[in-house]
Structure formats: structure tokens, C-alpha cells
Image (cartoon, rainbow, N blue to C red):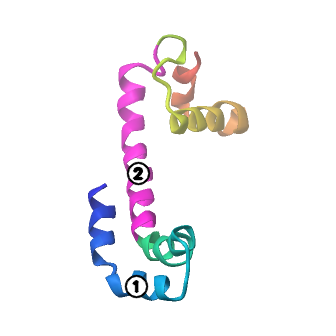
Amino acid sequence: MIFYLAALQNIPPELEEAARLEGSTRWYYFRRVLFPLLMPTTLFIMINAVLNSFKLVDHLFVLTKGGPDNASNLLLYYILKVHFLFLTPITQRPSLSSCWDS
């Protein structure tokens, strides 16, 4: 939220004034002016979120391996597990994949 607040404060108010003078609605101003100007901030936040989710997988694997009945399973851990257990041929699996079997 702080990143979006900083991005919104960085947008000049003259853009909103110009859009209102041209008769645009609030939705049109958001869709055509505000949202495209917030896209770099959105991309930055999405990249940080993905990187942080990669950092969390090793903690989950060490602590719970998905927990009882996959209660603490993450989407990224599920994708990793499916890739190494079901999509990779047996001859190409890493030696640690046998401990991933649930």
C-alpha cells in the first residue's frame, strides 16, 4: 500500500483536471490515465511478491512438508512437487525426490 500511495502522490493533479475538462468519467479517468501510470508500481510489487514466495518454499518444506492433509501447502510448493514427482521421468529425478513422496 505504501508503494501505491507514493505512486499516487507522484501523479500530477493536472492530469485529472485535464480529464475532467474533457468530460471523462471517474471510471474512464482511472482506466485510461491512472491505471497505466500505476503499472510500473504494480509490476514492481508483483515481482517482489513472486520473489518472496520463492523464499518461503524452503521454510515450508523443512518445517511441515505441506502439513497434515496439505493444510500449509503453498501454490509454489505444489507446482514444485508436481513437477518433480509427476512430470519428470524417474531416471531424471534428483535423489532427494524420494523424501517428497507423501
Is residue 27 something one can see in this rendering? yes
Per the rendering, the mark at residue 49 is 2
Q: Residue at x 42, y 27 (%)?
A: 61
Could you tell me which residue is drawn at 41 percent across and 81 percent down? 16
Magenta range: 41-67
Vertical position of residue 17 compared to residue 87: above or below: below
**How many marks are shown on the rendered structure?**
2
Image quarter in which the N terminus is found: bottom left
Mark 2 or 1, nearer chain start: 1
Quadrant where the image shows the C terminus: top right
Q: Is residue 72 a member of the stretch shown in magenta?
A: no
According to the image, label 1 marks what residue? 17
Residue 81 image position (x, y, % from top left):
59, 32
Is residue 89 rendered to the left or right of residue 94?
right
Q: Which quadrant of the figure has residue 42?
A: bottom left
Disc 1 crowd rating (10 Å Cα; few below 14, some 14-19, many 20+) is few
| Label 2: how many Cα within 10 Å (few below 14, some 14–19, many 20+) | few
Marks 2,1: beta carbons within 8 A: no
**Amino acid beneath label 2:** Ala
Q: Residue at x 46, y 73 (%)?
A: 34
10 displayed left or right of 31: left
**Residue plotted at (50% across, 32% down):** 74
Q: CA distance from mark 2 to mark 1?
A: 34 Å
Residue 53 belongs to the span the image colors magenta: yes
